[in-house]
Amino acid sequence: MIYCVAIIAIGNGREHTSAYVVALSAQSTAPGRLPYHVNRITNEEFMLTTAQRAHYRRDGYIVIPDFKPADELARLRQRAEAIVDAFDPAESRAIFTTRDQARASDAWFLGSDNTVRCFFEEEAFGPDGRLKQSKALSINKIGHAMHDLDPVFEAFTRDAKLAAVARDLGLAQPQIWQSMYIFKQPGIGGEVRWHQDATFFDSTPISVTTFWFALEDATLDNGCLWVEPGGHRGPLRERFLREGDAITMEKLDGTPWPDDSTAVPLEAKAGSLVCFHGLLPHYSAPNRSAVSRHAFTLHVTDGRTAYSPRNWIQRDASLPVRGFE
Ligand code: FE2
């Protein structure tokens, strides 16, 4: 006779769930002996604690300190520096000098969907069109396919621990559509207004989840994230649509953005991972401090949901979308 049972043991804040086949036999029921022998058939270990998973469901985000070691952070920073160093500002200077600035800016942005490009901070240039500070201190971000195209970023992304976190958050078939290296430069690091990431990565049903890594300490002074706990249970307010070379922001819902009464800052030490739901409203203030606030982000949907063909990033067989493995 064979029975299946689930045994849960909790220790050190981690949860281990194992399924066992328990076989009972007449021979094993001798006095003083356990009346069964046990064969383990699966052994699933959760990366996140029960409390972390409950927090994510309730508030729409979790902060996991000490997720990435210092050497991995340093490698990513060095690689980002090298990409910026190799970047010729003339490639995108048109954005700041042409009369049709919005259109040139859109083209530079749309062309970065499945490549690696640098973007300047809005306040990087003076009235004379020259950089106000060094190029290295003028870049807003690098985007948007380093996780697939750059070996250092790929190694950072393809991490078994990350795959486990994604699984614990409910992403059964993770698909990583976008990566961004965000500099939030000292003095000129721009504000990122309130938004929801599902605006840019729509699917039916909505599944996009953001993985946000603090590469440096993120503080109130240098423009840490702000979120509205529980706000992921609200509606999607806007949808960012691409049609060929044209982009539009479609208004879907008039629910106001959070204010100081409901928003909370997420200060995070370097190495922390912040995960948040695609419907969670979030924001970051300008960085007027003397120190930068580098971060790396990944935007991930679940392959079981229908990814919108109107999202600005699409993939085909030449660069298939992949998960964490
Ligand atoms: Fe965002």
Image (cartoon, rainbow, N blue to C red):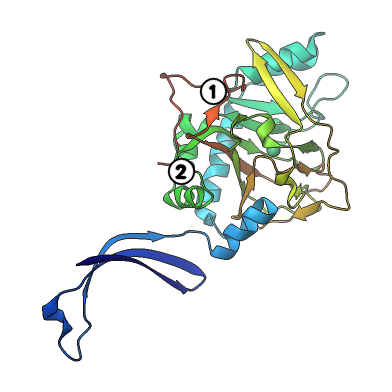
* Kind of residue at badge 1: Thr
- Residue in the picture at 81% in, 25% down: 125
59 horizontally vs 64: left or right: right
- Residue in the picture at 40% in, 64% down: 17
Which residue reaches farthest left?
27
Picture coordinates of residue 56 (x, y %)? 63, 54
Q: SS of the residue at dot 1?
A: loop
- Residue in the picture at 71% in, 26% down: 239
Q: Is residue 65 visible?
A: no
Which residue position holds label 1?
115
When asked about the image quadrant of residue 94, the answer is top right
Picture coordinates of residue 35 (x, y %)? 21, 80
Q: Quadrant of the N terminus?
A: bottom left
> Does residue 26 sit above or below 125 in this rendering?
below
* Kind of residue at badge 2: Ala
Q: Quadrant of ligand 1?
A: top right
When asked about the image quadrant of residue 280, the answer is top right
Q: Quick one: 36 or 242, which is closer to the camera? A: 36
Question: How many residues crowd mark 2 within 10 Å: few (<14), some (14–19), many (20+)?
Answer: some
Q: Is residue 68 visible?
A: yes
- Residue in the picture at 46% in, 43% down: 172
Picture coordinates of residue 306 (x, y %)? 53, 28
127 horizontally vs 23: left or right: right
Q: Which mark is residue 10?
A: none
Which residue position holds label 2?
172
Question: How many residues crowd mark 1 within 10 Å: few (<14), some (14–19), many (20+)?
Answer: some
> Does residue 159 sit above or below 98 in this rendering?
below
Q: Is mark 2 within 8 Å of ligand 1?
A: no
42 horizontally vs 12: left or right: left
